[in-house]
Amino acid sequence: MMLPKQLQDMINKQINMEFFSAYLYLGLAAKCEQLHYRGAAQWLRAQAAEEKEHAMRFFEFLVDYDVPVTLMPIEAPNVDPKSLLEVFEQSLAHEQKVSKSIEEIFAAVMEQKAYSAFQLLSWFLTEQIEEEKTVRNIVRTLQVIKDDVPSLIEFDRQLGSRTSENS
């Protein structure tokens, strides 16, 4: 089966976007360490690992179809949040951007009748719903907590319970 050139290019760009996502989450983790939110930093490290797995899923798909993988430069993320809420607002905005990109690839799959990519993209559509929901819930919790220090400390502790294995 041949994968249309447009889809090859879109998936190669998505690989780059997923690796950028990992960079973004690592940058946000470093910022959380500076802000002394070690639990959030751990959560973000686990998220970065998950994003690398996503990139590799797309990578392996192209390899399986004998399509050239084109690794592009990864842009440095702009990371300068002033609060834990801003960290996760930036995360949510990014996940929404990723969702849009995956939806565009899915639309191209359907338009070009490249059904061999259907299962992969269906998985990613479902995954993005979960990603956005998770980060949106964190944002909402932080909006309720505001600047209540004991609540922030406890929520940071809860975020820190996430590992790469239970993400």
Image (cartoon, rainbow, N blue to C red):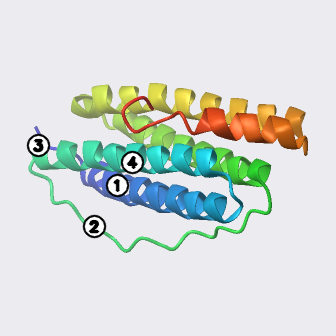
For the residues bearing labels 1 and 3, Cβ distance under 8 angstroms? no
Residue type at the position of mark 4: Ala
Q: Position of residue 29 (x, y in %)?
A: 57, 57
Image location (x, y in percent) of residue 134: 61, 30
Q: Residue at x 41, y 47 (%)?
A: 51
> In the rendered image, which quarter is residue 5 located in?
bottom left
Q: CA distance from mark 3 to mark 2?
A: 16 Å
Pointer 1 or 3: first along the chain: 1
First of labels 4, 2 by sequence position: 4
Q: As displayed, is residue 130 above or below residue 14? A: above
Would residue 77 be visible to someone looking at this image? yes
In the rendered structure, which amino acid carries the disc numbered 2?
Leu
Give the residue number, with chain letter if any, for mark 3: 64
Whether pointer 3 and pointer 2 mark residues with C-beta atoms closer than 8 Å, the reply is: no
Does residue 65 show up?
Answer: no
Give the spatial CA distance, label 1 vs label 2: 8 Å
Residue at the spot of label 2: 71
Q: Residue at point 75% right, 41% down?
A: 153
* 4 and 3 marks in contact (CB < 8 Å): no
| Direction from residue 1 to residue 28 in the image, left or right | right
70, above or below 29, in the image: below
Point out the tag, 4 or 3, that comes first from the N-terminus.
Answer: 4
Q: Are marks 1 and 2 in contact (CB under 8 Å)?
A: yes
The residue wearing badge 1 is 15
Residue 156: % across, % down: 68, 41
